[in-house]
Image (cartoon, rainbow, N blue to C red):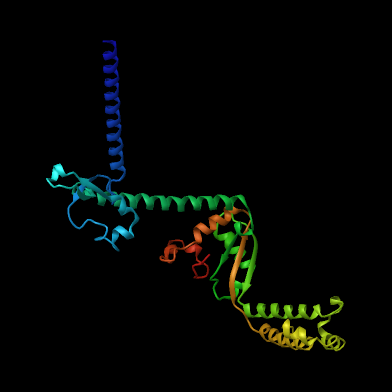
C-alpha cells in the first residue's frame, strides 16, 4: 500500500507538470501569434503526407535546392505493411504545411501599417526637433561674432548704402533699445580681391628664390632678378617651377589688372551689422526674417522697410 501510494503521488505530480507545461506552451504560442500579427510569418504549421511528386528528384533545381530553409519542411517516412495491406513497407514523404488563416487577420494589415508609419514619422520629427534644440543649446554655449551680427544680402543700390553711419542710425531709430557696435560694408569687388591674392602668391614665390626675402622690393624686381642664378632645368621639369623672370612678368601683369579693376565703381554686395548683445541680434532677426513663399508679409510693418526694400538677412 505504501508503494502504491507513492506511485500514485508521483503520477499525479507528473500529470500536474504536464498540464503546467501545456499551459505554458499555450501562453507562449498566443504571445508569439500577437507578435507576428500583421506580418507574413506563419507559425501555425502541421505535417501532412505527400502522395505524389514529393521526392527531391522532382524538386531538383527548384526551391528545395535553392532556398536553405525549405529542407526543414520536407521529411521522409515509412508506412508499415499492416496499414497499407502490402507485403512491404511503403516509403512516403511528409510536408510541413502552413495552416494560418489569412482572412482572420487581413483586416488588421491596414491599421497596423498605418500605425507603423505614424510612429516612424513621429519618431523622425521628434529626432529632428531634438537635434535643433541641441544645436541651439550648443550654439548658445559658445559665443562668437556671428552670434551678434546679421548680414544684409540685398542692400538697395543707393548712395546711402555706402555709409555705415546711415545703417547704424536706421537700426537704432527703427528698433527700440538698439545699439549698433559696428557696421561693415562689403563691396562687390570679388575680381579685384582675387587679383590681389594672385599677385601676393606670385610675390611669395619670388621671395622664396632669394637668399634674403626681406630684401625684396617690388619697384626694383628687375635688378633683383638679374643677380639671381639661372633656375636648374630639372626643377622646371619635375617641380613645374616658374623661373624668376617669368614670375616678374606675371607680377607686372597682375599689377596692371589690379590697376584697371581699381578704377571701377563697385556696388554694395552686403552689409554686416554687429550689435552689443545677442538678444538685440535675435530681436532684429525675428522682425526682419521673411519666408521665401510670402515675401510681402511685412507690409503691415512699413517701418522695417529700408528705402522701399524688404531686407533679406
Residue 100 shows in this picture: no
Residue 151 position in % (x across, y down): 57, 65
- Quadrant of the rendered image containing residue 166: bottom right
Residue sitting at the far top: 1
| 171 sits to left or right of 300 | right
Residue displayed at 29% across by 60% down: 63
Q: Nearer the viewer, residue 246 or 134?
A: 246
Q: Nearer the viewer, residue 313 or 66?
A: 66
Residue 105 shows in this picture: yes
Residue sitting at the far left: 85
Q: Nearer the viewer, residue 114 or 173?
A: 114
Residue 259 position in % (x across, y down): 70, 85
| 262 sits to left or right of 116 | right
In the rendered view, tell whether residue 297 sits above or below residue 35. below
Residue displayed at 63% across by 82% down: 265
In the rendered view, tell whether residue 195 sits above or below residue 165. below
| Quadrant (top left, top right, bottom left, bottom right) of the N terminus | top left
Residue 100 position in % (x across, y down): 22, 47
Q: How many marks?
A: 0
Residue displayed at 22% across by 56% down: 54
Amino acid at each position: 500500500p505504501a508503494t502504491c501510494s507513492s506511485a500514485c503521488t508521483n503520477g499525479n505530480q507528473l500529470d500536474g507538470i504536464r498540464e503546467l507545461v501545456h499551459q505554458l506552451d499555450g501562453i507562449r504560442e498566443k504571445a508569439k501569434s500577437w507578435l507576428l500579427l500583421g506580418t507574413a510569418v506563419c507559425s501555425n504549421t502541421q505535417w501532412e503526407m505527400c502522395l505524389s511528386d514529393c521526392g527531391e528528384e522532382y524538386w531538383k533545381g527548384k526551391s528545395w535546392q535553392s532556398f536553405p530553409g525549405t529542407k526543414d519542411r520536407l521529411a521522409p517516412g515509412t508506412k508499415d505493411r499492416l496499414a497499407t495491406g502490402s507485403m512491404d513497407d511503403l516509403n512516403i514523404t511528409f510536408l510541413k504545411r502552413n495552416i494560418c488563416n489569412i482572412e482572420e487577420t487581413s483586416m488588421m494589415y491596414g491599421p497596423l501599417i498605418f500605425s507603423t508609419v505614424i510612429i516612424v514619422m513621429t519618431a523622425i520629427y521628434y529626432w529632428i526637433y531634438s537635434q535643433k534644440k541641441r544645436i541651439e543649446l550648443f550654439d548658445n554655449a559658445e559665443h562668437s561674432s556671428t552670434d551678434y551680427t546679421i548680414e544684409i544680402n540685398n542692400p538697395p543700390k543707393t548712395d546711402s548704402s555706402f555709409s555705415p553711419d546711415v545703417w547704424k542710425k536706421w537700426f537704432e531709430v527703427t528698433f527700440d533699445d538698439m545699439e549698433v557696435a559696428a557696421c561693415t560694408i562689403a563691396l562687390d569687388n570679388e575680381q579685384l580681391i582675387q587679383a590681389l591674392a594672385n599677385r601676393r602668391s606670385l610675390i611669395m614665390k619670388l621671395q622664396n628664390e632669394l637668399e634674403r626675402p626681406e630684401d625684396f622690393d617690388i619697384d626694383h624686381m628687375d635688378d633683383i632678378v638679374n643677380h639671381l642664378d639661372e633656375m636648374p632645368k630639372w626643377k622646371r621639369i619635375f617641380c613645374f617651377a616658374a623661373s624668376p623672370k617669368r614670375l616678374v612678368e606675371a607680377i607686372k601683369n597682375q599689377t596692371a589688372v589690379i590697376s584697371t579693376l581699381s578704377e571701377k565703381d563697385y556696388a554694395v554686395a552686403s552689409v554686416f551689422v554687429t550689435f552689443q548683445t545677442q538678444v538685440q541680434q535675435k530681436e532684429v532677426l525675428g522682425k526682419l526674417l521673411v519666408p521665401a513663399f510670402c515675401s510681402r508679409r511685412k507690409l503691415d510693418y512699413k517701418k522695417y522697410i529700408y528705402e522701399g526694400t524688404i531686407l533679406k538677412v
